[in-house]
Image (cartoon, coloured by chain):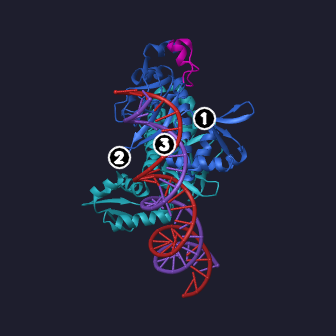
Chain colours: A blue, B cyan, C red, D purple
Amino acid sequence: MNIPETLNKSFLFGSFSSDQLRQLAEFTTVKKLKKDERLFDEGEKASAFYFVASGSVKIYRISSEGQEHTIEIQRDGDLVAEAAIFDKETYPAFCQAMDETVLLRIPKHDFIQMIERHPRIAIEIMHGYSKRLRWFVRLVEDLTMHNIKSRLARYILNNLSRDSERHISKLSISKKELASLLGTIPETLSRTLKSLKKDGLIGEEGDYIVIQNLRRLREVAE
Amino acid sequence: MNIPETLNKSFLFGSFSSDQLRQLAEFTTVKKLKKDERLFDEGEKASAFYFVASGSVKIYRISSEGQEHTIEIQRDGDLVAEAAIFDKETYPAFCQAMDETVLLRIPKHDFIQMIERHPRIAIEIMHGYSKRLRWFVRLVEDLTMHNIKSRLARYILNNLSRDSERHISKLSISKKELASLLGTIPETLSRTLKSLKKDGLIGEEGDYIVIQNLRRLREVAE
DNA sequence: AAAACGCCTTGACTAAAGTCAAGACGTTTG
DNA sequence: CAAACGTCTTGACTTTAGTCAAGGCGTTTT
């Protein structure tokens, strides 16, 4: 793998000069994970953050009853644990590969030194942080203000792509995972999907959700 | 008000030299709000962020049914909308004073220029962002993994202070606000408090929650 | 002081989501 | 290939939280 070139694909390093990329690549290492292998555990000392080059990882916590709750899923092009860079503390959640996944590991110490030399980088990072914070504000709103049907509708709408003449939404994760991501359980998700199908808003074709009534689906999503 | 001195009290500018503070103060202005006056609206162009010098503000959104949902409450020493600094976008929520409130307004454009000259500031800010992100991760966990009794117990425990020999928790906000902050409604909060009192975990004395059984309260909080 | 108001509480009821149990279906494993 | 397993679905039931309505109480307004 060409590390500078791969790094260049992230929003964070997209504007870097080739010189800066070379600098960055000097302390960046490649980390490969098999499916279900863990990248880090909650409570572990955070010494680095990661860039997902290929594959996907899930960030999750475990409740006192032992139940796993997915907080987010990061795919290729995303950063993982960049919030941990500037804290002396520990990772706040678990991170596990969902497929064969390749990551670039960027040690936080080296990265901080680099920022001090190149302040512009900091602005980019903070831009990324802002976006992430906004996303969380939306998520909290979603969890407190909307029911599961509406959350599911939003999820589908956010995943929308076009297939010839139809709007479709690929379920790239298992329904069990999706349930956890929506803050519910598989049974409830199953019933909610059924209800949307019954009302003619969507259809299911294998791994795809086919939108049958976009306007009404948008109404449900609010 | 002495602007440099006030700014110096924030975690963000606490480590600034008097020269840096003077620079910062040059483009910082004072903004006073009466109770219930709004600082900014959702969707408004974000041109500045704020430091709460005294008083408190709430950050909230409004659902499609017109219901207000508090996301967080910021008090003196806290920053408001610092996530909006690095986005070209707009404020993601409403902000309204809960008391007579004095804020320092820091225009984002000037501030970004300052960062470019003093990269160390950026590290401090990112540290603040990390903390905020962590807080959101906790919040999302709270909303998806715990019921209201447990959320309330956590809130009380996070607010704990000592009064001679007793653990107490001051309710510095109205119960209506607290309900919104916990993601519920006043009726449910009222019943949940009643249930904790009935079980002998807490007592209420005016504006204070008196902890009567800390161990069991911690169990409820999980 | 009476009326109006907002906040909080309570009760009866409803709606939403979770639990438990069972079974269908497809994939992996011995 | 059959057993074992995991995922998904469905049904019956329970729990949790929200809705609606009413009333208490203290504060502000007239």
Characterize the local packing of mark 1: few (<14), some (14-19) or many (20 or more) Cα atoms within 10 angstroms: few
The image shows residue B155, relative to residue A2, as above or below, that is below
Q: Nearer the viewer, mark 2 or mark 1?
A: 1
In reply to whether residue A18 is colored magenta, the answer given is: yes
Characterize the local packing of mark 2: few (<14), some (14-19) or many (20 or more) Cα atoms within 10 angstroms: few
- For residue A5, side relative to residue A114 (left or right): right
The image shows residue B185, relative to residue A58, as above or below, that is below
Residue A87 is at least partly visible in this image: yes
- Quadrant for residue C1, please give it: bottom right
Give the image location of residue A15, x and y in percent: 59, 20
Characterize the local packing of mark 3: few (<14), some (14-19) or many (20 or more) Cα atoms within 10 angstroms: many
Disc 1/disc 3 C-alpha distance (Å): 20 Å
Disc 2/disc 1 C-alpha distance (Å): 35 Å
Give the image location of residue A189, x and y in percent: 54, 46
Which label number is shown at residue A206? 1
> Which residue is nearer to you in this view: A124 or C24?
C24
The image shows residue A139, relative to residue B196, as above or below, that is above
- Quadrant for residue A112, please give it: top left
- Quadrant for residue B162, please give it: bottom left
Query: Tag 1: residue type?
Result: Gly
Quickly name the residue at label 2: A64
- Marked residue nearer the N-terminal end (2 or 1): 2
Which label number is shown at residue A180? 3
Q: Residue shown at 72%/35% (left/top)? A: A166
Query: Tag 3: residue type?
Result: Ser
> Which residue is nearer to you in this view: A114 or B220?
B220
In reply to whether residue B113 is colored magenta, the answer given is: no
Which contiguous range is marked in magenta?
A1-20
- Marked residue nearer the N-terminal end (1 or 3): 3
